[in-house]
Structure formats: C-alpha cells, structure tokens
Image (spheres, rainbow, N blue to C red):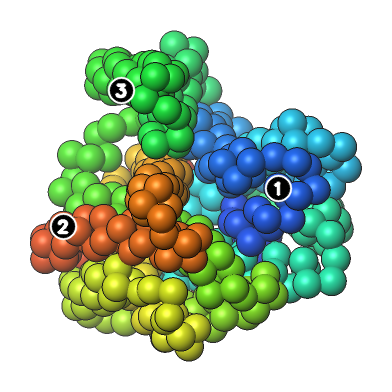
Amino acid sequence: MNKPDHSARNKRVIWLLLVSAFVVILNETIMNVAIRELMIDLNITARAAQWLTTAFMLTMAVVIPITGFLLQRFNTRPIFIAAMSLFSTGTLLAALAPGFSFLLLGRVVQASGTAIMMPLLMTTVMTLVPPRERGKTMGNVSIVISVAPAIGPTISGIILSSLSWRWMFWLVLPIAVTMLIIGARRVENVTEPKKVPIDVASVILSALGFGGLIFGLSRVGADSASSTAPMWIALITGAVSLLVFVLRQLKLQRKDRALLDLRTFSEPIFAVSASLMVISMASLFGTVILLPIYLQQVLGLEPVQVGLLLLPGGLLMGLLAPFVGRLYDKIGPRPLVVPGTIVLSSVMWFLSTISESTEPMVILAAHMSLSVGLALLFTPLFSAGLGSLKPHLYSHGSAVVGTVQQVAGAAGTALFITIMSIQSTALASEGAVEAVAVAGGVRMAFMTGAVVSLLGIVAAFFLRKPEDPVEVSQPDVVRQVDVPTH
C-alpha cells in the first residue's frame, strides 16, 4: 500500500535535487568568459581573475570529502537546506562585491554549498533507484554534472553582451532562493541518519592535501625562476598531507571511522571509473577555459559570440545523456566508453593543430564532437563506478567521485592555463604577435591533453558493468524502491 507513495516521494526528491544541482553547478564555469571584463572593472590581472574559477573548484575539493560524514550523520532535508542556503548567500555576496577580495569570498561560499549538493544528489539516487534503472537516472545526473559547466560560458556570454558581470549573480539569485524555499517545503527525508564520529585531523589533512596540490599547480609557470618557493612549498605540503591523509583513512576505515573510506578503490570497476573521470573532467574543464581565451584573443570574437558558439556542444551533451543512460542499462559501459575515449582523444589531437587562421565553424564542429565523446563517458562512469559499491559505501563513493571531479577539473584548468602561458610567453619573447603567441600556447596545452587522453583509451577496455547488483541490507540505508525516471 505504501509503495506508490514512496515512489512519488522519491521521484519528487530526485527531481528537486537535480534542478537545484544544475543551478549550483552552472556557476562553476560561469566566470570564464567574464575574465576580460573583470580585469578592467576590478583592475586585476588575468591570473587573479582566473582564481574566481579555480577557487570555486578548490573549495569544492576541500569540502566534498567532509560530505561523506554529513550524509551519514544528517537527514536529507537539513543537508539540502544547508547547501542551498550557502549557495544563495554566496551568490548575494558576489553580486554586491565592492572589490575582488569580496567577490572571491562570495565564490568560496557559493562553492561550499555546491560541494554539499552534488554528493547529496548522487547518494540519494544510488539509495532510491534500483540497479536496473540507474543508467536512465544517471543520464539525468550527467546533464547536471557535465552540461551545466559546459554551458556556463554561454550563459555568461549572453549576459555580458548587454549587462555587467554582476548580473551573472543577480539573475541566478532568485532562482536559487526559489529552489531553497520549494526544497525546504517539499524535500523529504529519504535516508536514516546514524551517529558517526568525525576525525578532525582527517579534515585538516584533506584541506592541506587537496588545497596545497591545486594551489601549487596553479602557480606553475606563474612565478619567475627566483620566486618559485611558494609553488614548491604548496606542492610538497599538499603531497605530504595527502599521503598522511590516505594512511590515516586506511587505519580509520578498519573501524568504520574514516572521513573518506578508501575501500571504494578496492573495487576494480570503481577504480577504473575514477581514473577515467580524472581524464574526462580535466579535458572538459581545460577545454571550457581554453576555448573562450582562444576565440576571444586569437579569433577576435565577442563574449556573446563565444557563448553562442559553445552552446550547441553543451546542448548536444544534454540531449545525448538520457539516451546514453538507456543504452548503458541495455549493453553496459564498455561499448560506450571505448568509442567515447577515442572521440575525446581524436578531438584533443585535432585541437593541438589550430592556429590564428582557423575558422570559428571548425571550432564549433570540434567542440560538438568533443561533447559527443564526453556524453558517451560520463553516464557509464557514474553508473558503473558507484553501482559496483556496497550500499553502505554509497556516501563515501559519492564523496570520492565528487572529490576526483573537482581535483581533476582544477588541476586540468591550472595545467592547461599554465602550459598555454609558458608557451605564449616564449613565443612572444621571440617576436610573435599576440594572436600567434596565444594560438601557439593553446596548441601546446591541447597537445598535452591529447597525450594524456591516450591513457583513457587503454583504461576504457578494462571497464565492465557490475555483474551482481548489490541489494540493500544495511540498517542505515533505506529500502530501494522502483522510481519513475522519465
């Protein structure tokens, strides 16, 4: 008698989380096209302006590991309210920001809410949706995780064509507040919390580890040869802290007290999925940041033109995601992931040949092809990776996936920008004009991505669908029920 009520409730909760997550994730890349306007309006350098995106991803990488604890300790509704409240507050701070520092603070607060929302969505889906229908639902999740950041530059380009950069936040704010109000009234608790301890030392080590690595990567090539000490200090501190963090989690997980349970990686399918996510997310975010720079500084397009040029790829990825999800349910991940990695690598190699004379329509075709490749990857990776875990590891798996995504995205952004900057500076010092120098830097950055993408093709052949779906038997997770996903 209760099953229909549970199904309706679960469907409502999932769709509210999907829409809310789309809104918050959209802001991860919405600043990319606004860099030039921010440099002029706030009187800052390009690298400082880029921190508005990098700091967003960095904050998510620091906060997400804690969500494994939060999702076990608290009910669904208070977690949702906390996430959307933080995001709405950060959006308001950014819209009112009198200067760069205040704007950066707003972005950090925004990211704190976003970091909670994504693992909440993933864990809820894994808990409520039966294994045979997860591909379909994960297709919708892929729209949030991949399409939202992909169309961020498009939205900002359209806004900047007639309004100031502050409207990127003023227009988002009422949507975020509306979702907060609706969610506070309609999102119901669908999990059973339990009392779990939090290890403060792990939180500190996580922040130092992930934060140090991303900050260090962002400084590569930014400092002169005589002032690289901060970069090396950050990289070494990050690496050592991350090593100690891992060792501590291995010890704590024996008593089920780990902040981030690394037993998720003992499942080969999850490990392969995570490695492919690193390559995919680094490629996505690296491309999302490089193409607007190339289109504006080399081809001379206006922000609105850049946004419209990148829009078809983002929409195509969104249209394909549910279809790919249904295919996953029927044929599994390998027939989708192998072609996806090949397409991704092929486009990266092509982009390593572009120049100051490349036609914009050629870039449009390349970006749409890249979107097809990524669409073939994201849904199978999320579905197979998390679906291979035992139910009591869902929250930890979701946190690991979120952490991997953000670290890979931030590292990809930092790496692509750094390589572009180094090569562009070298070419400019040899007398090349700005457009030629920037084009050369972009080519070198994409060539680096192309080389890395070859590893993804190899890894794709080792991915398979979880053979035996795990039934929910733990008392801390609610019973799975059939959820309509279309």
Location of the C terminus by quadrant is bottom right
Q: Residue at x 66, y 36 (%)?
A: 108
Sooner in the amino-acid sequence: mark 3 or mark 1 = 1
Mark 3 touches mark 2? (CB < 8 Å): no
Instruction: Find the residue positioned furthest to the top.
Output: 201
Location of the N terminus by quadrant is bottom right
Of 374 and 347, nearer the camera is 347
Rounded to the nearest whole Å, what is the CA distance between mark 2 and mark 1?
37 Å
Of 131 and 55, nearer the camera is 55
Q: Could you tell me residue 111's position as x and y percent? A: 63, 41
Image quadrant assignment for residue 161: bottom right
Query: At label 2, which amino acid type do we have?
Result: Leu
Query: How dense is the environment of label 2, judged by Cα within 10 Å: few (below 14), some, or many (20 and up)?
Result: some
Mark 2 touches mark 1? (CB < 8 Å): no
Mark 2: secondary structure: helix
List the residue tagged with mark 3. 239
Query: At label 3, which amino acid type do we have?
Result: Ala
Q: Nearer the viewer, mark 3 or mark 1?
A: 1
Q: Could you tell me residue 215's position as x and y percent? A: 46, 30
Sooner in the amino-acid sequence: mark 3 or mark 2 = 3
Mark 3 touches mark 1? (CB < 8 Å): no
Query: How dense is the environment of label 3, judged by Cα within 10 Å: few (below 14), some, or many (20 and up)?
Result: some
